[in-house]
Every structure is written in structure tokens, then in C-alpha cells.
Image (spheres, rainbow, N blue to C red):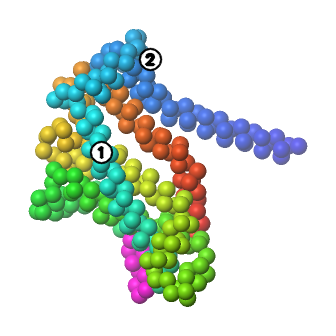
Amino acid sequence: MTGSKKKQRGIFLHNLLIAVLAFIWLIPIVWLVTTSFSAYSGMNTSTFFPQEWSLTHYKQLLFETDTVQQFPQWFMNTFIIACFTCVISTAFVLMVAYATSVMRFPMRKPLMNMAVILNLFPGMLAMIAVYFTLKSFNLTNSYAGLIMVYSASSGLGYLIAKGFFDTIPRALCESARIDGCNEARIFTNIIIPMSRPIIVYTVISSFLTPWMDFVYAKMILNSGISSKYTVAIGLYKMLDKSLINSYFTIFCCGGVLVSIPISILFMIMQKFYVEGITGGAVKG
């Protein structure tokens, strides 16, 4: 009886801790959402909830663009970059994962270990080298250069996808080889149809990288032309000390709208996303 009470008390404290952490985590999100409906344009720190509510700033953000804010154009720019990056990165990750999981070739394990070691270093260390490389090829201030940067090293993140591919029975691949299938047909006709969870996980992860990135976007798209900004750069510009009193509530509106597509995507794909993570964690 004592052991049962201790177990129940442990579960209660565990759930209480999760509830407290969730409450703390939700405070800034709730504040951002409620502030976006404020009738006041600047930052108001005197009250948590707005004193006057209005949809004016959402209307201004979406339909009344000016030299400072061009949110619809920023949204479209970011969406295009994210879609191209998503397709290229997903292809790279799945192909590298297939090669390291199913195929056997010389230097396979050293190459895998090298990829893991390289992933331990933050990408920011290569920022200067990346910038001057793009500049030498005249790819700065271009979406092509930004897409190349996001996609270039994506294959190094193969490990979770490889873990998922490791769970697929090798007998299927061997049978296909006996029937005369090459590696490309095995990959497209056998592995891919059985890998929907990890594909969904890879697609979402690849899409999120350019959607949320600020550092590389700011470094590469540095022409100062507002219409070429991504959402992250455009919203950041609104926080300039000369603009914040007029655009802070619009910034909050933009933050809410940017989160909506990602939230919808996660809710729709949550089941496959979780299955991809857990399936890829079975084997390394």
C-alpha cells in the first residue's frame, strides 16, 4: 500500500511539473497572440492583455503594404525558398540514408562516422566561408544561393532516416536483386513506399529550416530591398528602434500568421512525424 501511494505521489508530482513548465512556456505565446489584437500600435508593457481590442493591424499587415512592411511578399518569398529546400533536402537525406543503410561499399563506416562528427560542429562556424564562396559566384542576394546553403549539407542529417531504413527487412531488397532490380528500383519501388513516416518527418524538418531561419537569410539577402526579404528578416526590421512604436503590434500579427501553416502541418502529420522519430531511433 505504501509503495502504491509513493508511485501515485510520484506521478502527481511529475504531472504537476509538466503543467507548470507548460504554463511558463505558454505565457509568451499567449501574450504575443493577445497583443496582436491590440488597438495600440506600439509596445504596451503596463498590462498583459490589451485595453482595447481590434483587427486593424491584421488588415494593415495583409492588405496595406508600405515601404516598411510587405508581409504578403515576404511570406511568398519564404514559402518558395522553403518548398525548393524541402524537395532538395528530402531527396539528399533519403538517398544518403538508403546508401548507408542498404548498400555496402568501401569506406562506408568511416564516411558515416565523419558525417556524425561534422554534425557536432555548429553550421555558424562556416558562415564567413559560405558568404565569400557565394559572393565569388555572384550568388549573394539571390534565392538560389540561399536554397543552396540550406540544401548543401542536408545529407549529413541522414542518421534518423538510416535508423528507420534499418528496420525494413533486408530479405525484401535481396529478393528484388535476385529478380533483376537495380538499386534505383529497389529504392523507389520498395523502400520509399514503406517509409512514409520517415519521409513525413524529413519533409517537415527540411521545410522548417528555411521557414524559421534568420541568420543565414540575413547574411545572404543583405541588399536592403524590402521586397526581397524573408519573413524572419522583415519582421525583425519592424523591431528597429525608429519603427517599433508604429509597427510592434503588426510584428505580433506577423508572428501569429507565420506560426499558423506550421501548426496546421504538424497537426495533420503528427502521427507520421512521431512514428518517423521513434522508428528512426530503433537502430543507429
Q: Residue 191, image x and y in percent?
A: 52, 71
174 to the left or right of 52? right
Q: Nearer the viewer, residue 58 or 14?
A: 58
Q: Residue 221, image x and y in percent?
A: 18, 47
Farthest residue to the front: give it.
179
Amino acid type shown at disc 2: Phe
Image point 50% across, 77% down: which residue? 186
* Position above or below: 39 against 13: above
* Position above or below: 183 against 281: below
Q: Nearer the viewer, residue 210 or 128?
A: 210
Query: Is 22 part of what is drawn in magenta?
Result: no
Quarter containing the N terminus:
top right
Lower sequence index among marks 1 and 2: 2
**Neighbourhood count class around disc 1 (C-alpha, 10 Å): few under 14, some 14–19, many 20 upward:** many
The overriding secondary structure of the stretch rendered in magenta is helix
Q: Which mark is residue 101?
A: none
Circle 2 sits in a helix, a strand or a loop, which is it? loop
Circle 1 sits in a helix, a strand or a loop, which is it? helix
Task: Tell me the quarter of the picture where residue 278 sits.
Answer: bottom right
227 to the left or right of 270? left
Residue segment shown in magenta = 105-116
* Position above or below: 144 against 106: above
> Which-is-in-front pick, marks 1 and 2?
1
198 to the left or right of 35? right
Instruction: Please indicate, yes or no, whether residue 236 appears anywhere in the rendered image.
Output: no
- Residue topped by disc 1: 78
Task: Tell me the quarter of the picture where residue 15 sits.
Answer: top right
Task: Tell me the quarter of the picture where residue 91 sits.
Answer: bottom left
Q: CA distance from mark 1 to mark 2?
A: 31 Å
- Residue topped by disc 2: 49
Q: Residue 260, image x and y in percent?
A: 43, 36
* Position above or below: 165 against 273: below
